[in-house]
Amino acid sequence: MGSFRFVPILLLLTCPALAQTYNIGRAPTAAELAQSITISPTGEGLPKGRGTAAEGEALYTEKNCITCHGPAGVGGINSAPNLIGNKGTGPGDDPWKRVNGGEAPGALPILAPNAIITWDYINRGMPLGAEGTLKPNEVYALTAYLMVLNKLIPDDMVLDESNLPKIKMPIGTNWVRVPDWKPGAPRMPGYPY
């Protein structure tokens, strides 16, 4: 039974060789490597662009975000999180929670430690079924709309690559950081199974 422990390791080590042998996959080109999609919490890597909440509200309707997340970010289908949060007031309440329940434990605009995460998630993962198709100005506008809905920025603020990293998020430093986790540690609170 002891030799079976080495089988997964052996498979991992041979996968690149098998991929090359059978022409599966390829090495990235220099141009692909030059296109970094990493965005730092300081804003480094954000593309140039701008957007307002008014533009974002129009896009929210145009891109059919309403179907999943509901009008003004609340009341969509059960599997999609509401996008509006409020501060918990009862004993044992989370400092911030989503308005009107739903299944997901929180809404990205209020539970992200910085606004750049919200921008990046919209940029990479929305709209459902057409992920990654939004232009930078559209992502800034949608992010501004969510920030205004959650009362994190003024209604008339023009959101861009220079002021997005400066937005103070309600969760502050009250979030689980990956470096805090160590092998064998219990799962993070609220994590399934």
Image: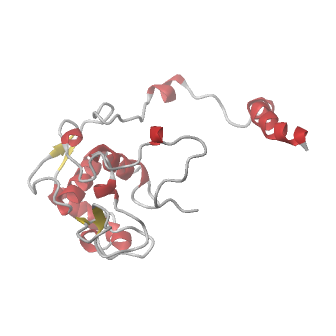
In the displayed structure image, the side of residue 24 where residue 143 appears, left or right:
left
Quadrant the C terminus occupies: bottom right
Query: Which quarter of the image is occupied by the N terminus?
Result: top right
Query: Residue 88: image x %, image y %?
Result: 25, 67
Q: Nearer the viewer, residue 108 or 72?
A: 108
Question: Is 116 displayed left or right of 151 in the figure?
Answer: right
Extreme-front residue of the structure: 91
Q: Is residue 8 left or right of residue 69?
A: right
Q: How many marks?
A: 0
Residue 67 sits above or below residue 180 on the image: below
Question: Which of the colour schemes (rainbow, by chain, secondary structure, one colour) is used?
Answer: secondary structure
For residue 143, above or below residue 38? below
Residue at 30%, 76% in the rendered image: 100
Residue 55: x and y, percent?
Answer: 18, 57
Residue 9 figure quarter: top right
Residue shown at 80%/37% (left/top)?
A: 11
Q: Nearer the viewer, residue 68 or 182?
A: 182
Q: Give the residue displayed 48% in from the left and 53% down from the top.
A: 188
Residue 166 figure quarter:
top left
Instruction: Classify residue 30 as left or right of residue 68.
Output: right
Between residue 48 and residue 146, name the one nearer to us.
146
Residue found farthest to the top = 30
Q: Nearer the viewer, residue 172 or 60?
A: 172
Q: Position of residue 82 (x, y in %)?
A: 33, 68
Measured from the top left, where is residue 176 in percent x and y? 41, 48
